[in-house]
Image (cartoon, rainbow, N blue to C red):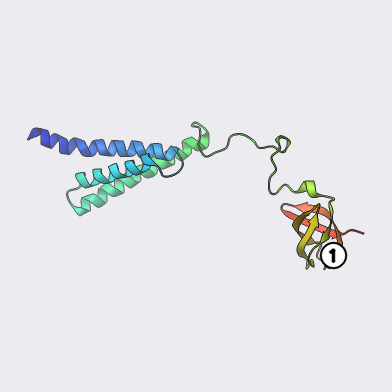
Amino acid sequence: MLAEIDLFVILPIVLFVIGFILIGIEMLTPGISVPGITGSVCLILGIFLTADTFQEGIVITIIVLVILSIMFAITLRILSKGKLKSPIILKEEQNRDKGYLSSNDLNHLLGKEGMATTDLRPSGTGVFDGMELDVISEGKYIEKGTKLIIHNVQGSKLIVKVND
């Protein structure tokens, strides 16, 4: 009889500890995987085995959620300070001199000559070195077929003017 009582007292505690450890591992690895699912099952089983009434189940669930929230906040703080290597944050720089180009890095197009493939009212498209690009005129209407030159880049906007 004493062994049965010990089992019903120890099993939920073991399930809670295993559940929190597995959820902690899941917080450090991106995605939904085996530790997260198994940890959630352990916590749910622990709640069912511990609670005698529905109200106790709600209170225990709230306590478990508060502990998980605290764990999550601590994990975020540790990862943001760089004390642990984050699996989802890229540490290497991607510099232009190493061959990486940002989608917003369009300065290499400055001075390119091309032709308007649509009417620019003031936006439209133009072909520059065989690439069709979205462009914006300086506020003026430009007809299709007009020769253009890219004379300004503002972020991802290509500002063109008539190439005389």
Which amino acid is tagged 1?
Gly
The residue furthest right is: 164
Seen in the picture, residue 114 relative to 48 is either above or below; the reply is: below
**Where's residue 29, x and y in %?**
45, 38
Q: Please give the count of numbered marks on the rendered protein.
A: 1
Which residue extends farthest front?
Answer: 130
Residue at 46%, 41% in the rendered image: 30
Q: On the image, numbered disc 1 is attached to which residue?
A: 145
Q: Is residue 85 above or below residue 101?
A: above
| Left or right side of 74 for 128 | right
Picture quadrant where residue 15 is located: top left
Residue 140 horizontal/vertical position (percent): 83, 66
- Taking the spot 50% from the left edge, 32% from the top edge, the residue there is 85
Q: Secondary structure at mark 1?
A: loop
Judge by depth and name the residue closer to the eye, 102 or 63. Answer: 102
Which residue appears at 79% of the width and 57% of the height? 127
Instruction: Specify the quadrant of the image occupied by residue 126.
Output: bottom right
- Residue 98 in the image: state x and y as whole percent: 70, 35
User: Where does the image place residue 164, in percent across and percent down from the top left?
Assistant: 92, 59
Q: Is residue 8 left or right of residue 155?
A: left
Q: Residue at x 64, y 35 (%)?
A: 93
